[in-house]
Image: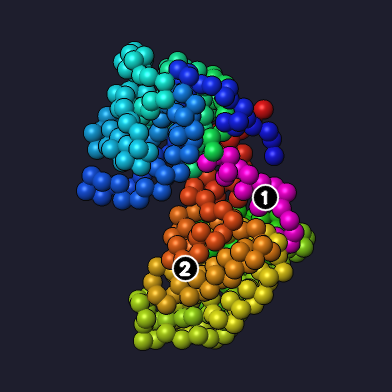
Amino acid sequence: MARFKTLDDLPADLTGKRVLVRVDLNVPMQGGSVSDDTRLRAALPTIEELAGKGAIVLLLSHFGRPKGHVRPDMSTALLVSPLTELSGRSVRFIEDCQGPEAERAISIMLPGSIGILENTRFHLGEEANDAELAKGMAALGDYYVNDAFSAAHRAHASTEGVAHLLPAFAGRAMEAELSALQKALGKPERPVAAVVGGAKVSTKLAVLSHLVGKVDHLIIGGGMANTFLAARGVDVGKSLCERDLIGEAESIFDRADEAGCIIHLPYDVVVAKEFAPNPPSLRTVNVHEVAPDEMILDVGPAAVEALSDALKTCRTLVWNGPLGAFETPPFDVATVSLAKTAAALTQDGSLVSVAGGGDTVAALNQAGVAQDFTFVSTAGGAFLEWMEGRALPGVAALEQ
């Protein structure tokens, strides 16, 4: 992995230095309050370290999708109170993220203080990576720190443009994320397994195509497994199946054979005639015994046991997506069971496990094992693009 500077490369004494910190504070809100503060908490170590060194810490973030319009319901002013509460430090709101008004507000801030700049997306130039907006942001700081891996797949003014205009560093959350990802697919201990689940093959074609050349075991679950089963001649009944992508599935099988990658598909499945919690038509069958009026909604117990055995032979695991319709019981059983196996192997020291993506994090939390994985990424799009083997603009801009 290319070398990038971290907070360790900044001067030990930052008294009075203005540090622009790109964080991802795009948190969900309910009734005017933050309903999940995970991303706020993730930003705290970098904020506290810089403030502790005497820096004037200036937080840059997008918040919602205002599309270049000023919207009070998407103002980062709403985050001042929760950030103050979590950090135990006073947080000042700055009414723009560039320009003379922001410069005046920052000029009276004291060493060790924290300010949150207004929503970067109130400017149309943010998402266009406008050079003038990036210059305006850069004019507010002496250093730039990117601590927002979850926004690193976007070449925006605040994630990519500014990084070329100031000395640029990775924050602690970004550093941890990149180190974990390097262990998982950069230079992993072999054998390597990947679990890829979710509803549609179409959303993860690039991921699957990239992984067959990188991993030893590819476990495919969720609705997308049905398309691969259909490519193998299995009648999947009423199950979600993208028949127009059967040719793509066949080509992934071919590439896996060439690369020596074993693709694991379920050979027993949990089916029902209706998609509802604990439906009366629920049954577990061999994958070749799915009736025309049934849907495959989870991986069966025999297949889960075989997948667990496969994981026990591996040293590294990358996981993105559930194995079944985990939000609706009992179709969470396979995901929870395999997650518990992976967590136990991780805790025993025999497996490095990295998971990412919103549904994946929710599934691991549901299984009660998220804290037992080596690393769980809260990034969605950035994690997927990394799994596709694509360069992330926000990361590339930090590389030396």
- 398 or 67: nearer the viewer: 398
Q: Main secondary structure of the magenta part?
A: helix
In the rendered structure, the answer to whether residue 394 lies left or right of residue 80 reads right
Residue that protrudes farthest toward the left in the picture? 31
Whichever of labels 1 and 2 marks the residue nearer the N terminus, that label is: 1
Q: Tag on residue 367?
A: 2
Q: Which numbered marker is on residue 392?
A: none
Badge 2: residue crowd in 10 Å (few <14, some 14–19, many ≥20)? some
The label number, if any, that marks residue 183 in the structure image: 1
Q: Which residue is drawn at 53% across and 44% down?
A: 382
| Residue positioned 40% across, 75% down in the render | 329
x and y percent of residue 9 in the render?
62, 27
Answer with left or right where residue 215 lies relative to residue 59.
Answer: right
Q: Can residue 163 be seen in this view?
A: yes
Amino acid residing under circle 2? Ala
Graded by Cα atoms within 10 Å as few (under 14), some (14 to 19) or many (20 or more), the crowding at tag 1 reads some
Instruction: State which quarter of the image contains the N terminus.
Output: top right
Q: The residue tagged with tag 1: helix, strand or loop?
A: helix
